Each structure stands twice: as structure tokens, then as C-alpha cells.
Amino acid sequence: MRGILERYRQRYPWLDHLLRAAQSYSNHHGDHYAAAITFFSVLSLVPMLMIAFAAAGFVLAGNPELMRHLQDQVQAAAPGGLGPMLNQIIDGAIASRRGVGIIGLLGALYSGLGWMSNLREALTAQWDASSRDKPAKPESFLRTKVVDLLALLGLGVALVMSFALTGVGTAFASAVLTAVGFGHVPGARLVFTALAVVASITGMWLVFLWVIARLPRQPVPLRRAMHAAWLGAIGFEILKQAFAIYLDSVTASPTGQLFGPVIGLMVFAYFVSRFVLFLTAWAAEVREVPDIPAQRSPSQAPASARIHP
């Protein structure tokens, strides 16, 4: 069996590349790093929810009419006598919005830096096999955290721009179809939707390219990450569709509606983390074509020597 696999690896370079990437991913503890990234991803949900509640509290505190409308809706929807108690909870959340917001910001900063630090360490480990001649320079603790914070903010901006590009592309396609009157033409909406998907994939390609080639703690060649970024952008779209189908199937029952989103988010974060690290290992395992020195032309044999006594 091993001999057959070796023959196939010699015959198909893409298979040899894939197997070498899988071996490198395993040797550099890709699954362990993916689990750490997933942990900090889920940990960051709590402070993000606190920030969201604090922001909602500021909005409701400045809009009494909206506040009364919300309390009326809660009073009407709550069973039994739970309406007044829920309204008291809302009032308490609004009153403590500043403290909740500050704690949420501090928690988000801690979990976000931990997430970015583990992500950068994992990416650096996957590039380590191909960058041993470029060892990373040791940096101070404060400088490392500042760089991680800037990288976290940059990644957030890149993701927001990518998702905004997807939304704007879809809305623009719908607006164009409505304006020119092609909304009822067969196939027109499908074409514009495909263009929106292409725009989304292009935006995600830029995000994956930056993650794979610029987030590691040591310089890596940008050219070797380009193909991996294309695979990442296309694969991420497939993962999103699969996650949507999985979430619909999980939340079909009442118990699934309670725990399904959290479990689904953990599964999605874990698979995305493994996917990104495997792509990095795939990019790191690209074999560079060695420079073959030009062969010298064969020199002519010297003429025969005559020896005289």
C-alpha cells in the first residue's frame, strides 16, 4: 500500500503537496492551536454581549418612547406575571450600562488579545519549517501586545469591509435589476448574484492573504500565500453555507434552539481555525524551484605532448 501511495505521489504533484501539508500540520500541532483559538473565540462572546447590552442601554436611555414600546412588548409577550420582573431587569441593565460597558470592553480586550496571540503563534509554527533561516527576533512583552492589538484591529476592519462588500454587492445587484427592469428576466438575477459572490470571494481572498502571510511573527514570502488565499476564500464560502445548513438542522428542536447556536459557533470556529492553519501549512510546503547553474561547455582536450630526451 505504501509503495502504491509513493507512486501516486510521484505521478501527481498536487497529491504529494497535500500529504506533505497534512504531515506538516500534524507535526506543528495544528489541532492543539485550533482548539486554543476556538476557546478564545467562544470566550470573547461574553464581553461582546456585554458591550451590545451596554450599547442598547445607551440607546434606550436616550429614547424614552422606544423604551416604553419595548416594555409594552415584553409585558404582552411574557407569560403570567413575568412581565414586571423582566421590565425591572431591563431597567437595571440600563441603569448599569456604563459599568457593564467598561467591564465588557476590558473583557473583550483580554480575550481578543489572547485570540490574536494564539492565532499568530499558530501561523508562525506552521511557517516554521520553511523559515528556519529567518528566525524571529525576540520582542518585549509590551511591544508584542501592542502589535497584537494593531493586528486585531486590522483584521476586524478587513472582515467588516469584506462582509460589507458582500452586502453592498447583493444590494447593488438588486437595485440595478430593479432600475433597468431586468428583475423578471430569467437568469438575470442569477448572474448578478454570481457577481456578488465573486466580489465576496475576492474580498475574502484579501483577508486570507493578509492572515496567512502577514500575521505570523516572522516575515514570510507573500507570493507563496496567494494560491492558498484563493483556496481559503472559496473554502470559507463553502463552510459558511454548510454552517447555515447545520444550524438550521440543530435548532429544529426546543433544546437545540437553546444550546444549538453556541455549539454551532464552537464547531464553526474550530473548523475555520483548522482550515486556516492547514492552508498555512499548504503554503509553507511549496517547494521552490532551485536555481540550476548553467553548465559549462566541455573544453577541448589539449594537443598531445611530445617528450624529447
Image (cartoon, helix red, strand yellow):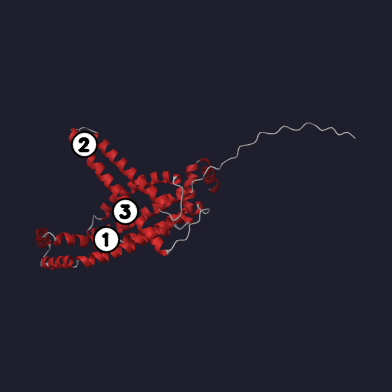
**Residue at point 43%, 51% (across, down):** 278
The picture places residue 202, in percent across and down from the top left corner, at: 34, 43
Q: Which residue is mark 3?
A: 156
Task: State the image coordinates of residue 80 (x, y, percent, origin top left).
Answer: 10, 66
Determine if residue 253 is in view. Answer: yes
Separation of disc 1 and disc 2 at Cα? 36 Å
Q: Is residue 3 left or right of residue 92?
A: right
Residue at mark 1: 48
Question: Viewer-proximal residue, 280 or 34?
Answer: 280
Q: Is residue 235 visible?
A: no
Mark 1 vs mark 2: which is more N-terminal? 1
Q: Secondary structure at mark 3?
A: helix
The image's mark for residue 176 is 2
Classify residue 243 as left or right of residue 84. right
Which residue lies at the image location 24% right of the left edge and 61% below the top edge? 51
Q: Residue at x 18, y 66 (%)?
A: 93
Q: Residue furthest right?
A: 309
Q: Nearer the viewer, residue 144 or 45?
A: 144
Give the residue type at disc 2: Val
Residue 112 rendering spot, x and y as whole percentages: 33, 60
Which amino acid is tagged 1?
Met
Give the total number of marks visible in the rendering. Answer: 3
SS at mark 2? helix
Task: Name the residue located 27 percent from the left edge and 36 percent from the top edge.
Answer: 191
Q: CA distance from mark 1 to mark 3?
A: 13 Å
Q: Earlier in the sequence, mark 1 or mark 3?
A: 1
